[in-house]
Amino acid sequence: MKVLCLGYSRTGTRSLREALLTLGFVHTYHTMDAAFINTRDCQTWLKWLRAKHDGIGRIPGRKDFDGLLGHCQAVCDMPAAYFAEELLEAYPDAKVILTTRDVDKWHKSVTNTLEVVDNSVFWATIGLFASLLRMPNRWNWPMFQKLHQVLYNHDFPRNGKASFEAHYARVRALVPADRLLEYHVSEGWTPLCAFLDRPMPEDNNTPFINQTSEINDKLMTMHMENLKAQGKRVLDICAYAALTWSVAQALRVVMERQNWITMI
């Protein structure tokens, strides 16, 4: 692990991920890895969130992080950033990037994107059916709900800004200045490459992605994929039930015929 990116979601972490991948930090882990690619990771993050916040279980250390992130050279976004102290202790030689954003703009962005999902009855229903149907992504909803509790006590309008500011103050207090880069994605490649000692890419445009419209489109795509996968699981269950019933009926007929022959 070479780079720890400890900024909150919606501060440019997705853009930073793409930038780090471009600079050769392979792989750079992001929340999207857990939500879309390795959905079982959400179970691990949920367990760790409960351990740190609720005192249930063991707080992760170097061995635990290596088990999940051992293939990565960088990690960013939540829920990883919540474990700032633990990650800093586990990887004392890693450089730290703190993605920054005006707190009011950040608050508005989260309100228009992540909060829509976190407070949605519709998404809660999808999460419930994912659990009932034993879907591979059944840990997504409980993990993100736990994260919402941990960060905002389920009241983002009231607690969001205070949570943001407290986290940033904590990271600044934990990390020596020569090991920390406070970075806004609008600053481009120059401070990023200088801090990481990497050459400037030939394409001098830093990726600027995951704007409000894009993340909402991404979430809608995830929603449709979830619905299709759950629909397929229901059809599979129905087909299995129908097959089981058919086999049982066939066996019943065979048994009745054998009993009739025996009686003769």
Image (spheres, rainbow, N blue to C red):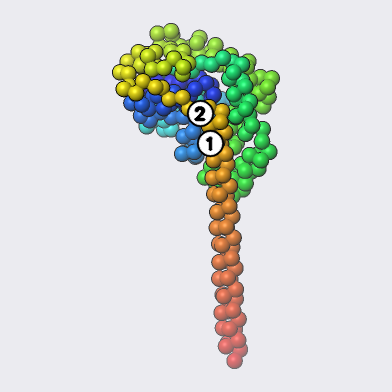
Residue 176 position, x and y percent, is 43, 9
Q: Say which quadrant the N terminus sits in.
A: top left
Q: Left or right? Give the position of 161 relative to 61.
A: right
Q: Say which quadrant the C terminus sits in.
A: bottom right
> Label 1, label 2: how many angstroms apart (C-alpha)?
9 Å
Residue position for label 2: 210
Which residue occupies 60% across, 29% down? 113
Q: Farthest residue in the bottom direction? A: 264
Residue position for label 1: 218
The earlier-in-sequence mark between 1 and 2 is 2
Which residue occupies 49% across, 22% down? 12
Answer whether labels 1 and 2 touch (C-beta < 8 Å): yes
Q: Is residue 224 above or below residue 242?
A: above
Residue 168 is drawn in which quadrant?
A: top right
Which residue occupies 57% across, 57% down? 235
Can residue 73 be seen?
no
Residue 203 is drawn in which quadrant?
A: top left
Can residue 154 be seen?
yes
Number of numbered tags placed on the structure image: 2
Residue 26 position, x and y percent, is 35, 29
Residue 204 position, x and y percent, is 36, 20
Which residue occupies 55% across, 36% down? 217
Which amino acid does the dot numbered 2 rest on?
Asn
Which amino acid does the dot numbered 1 rest on?
Lys
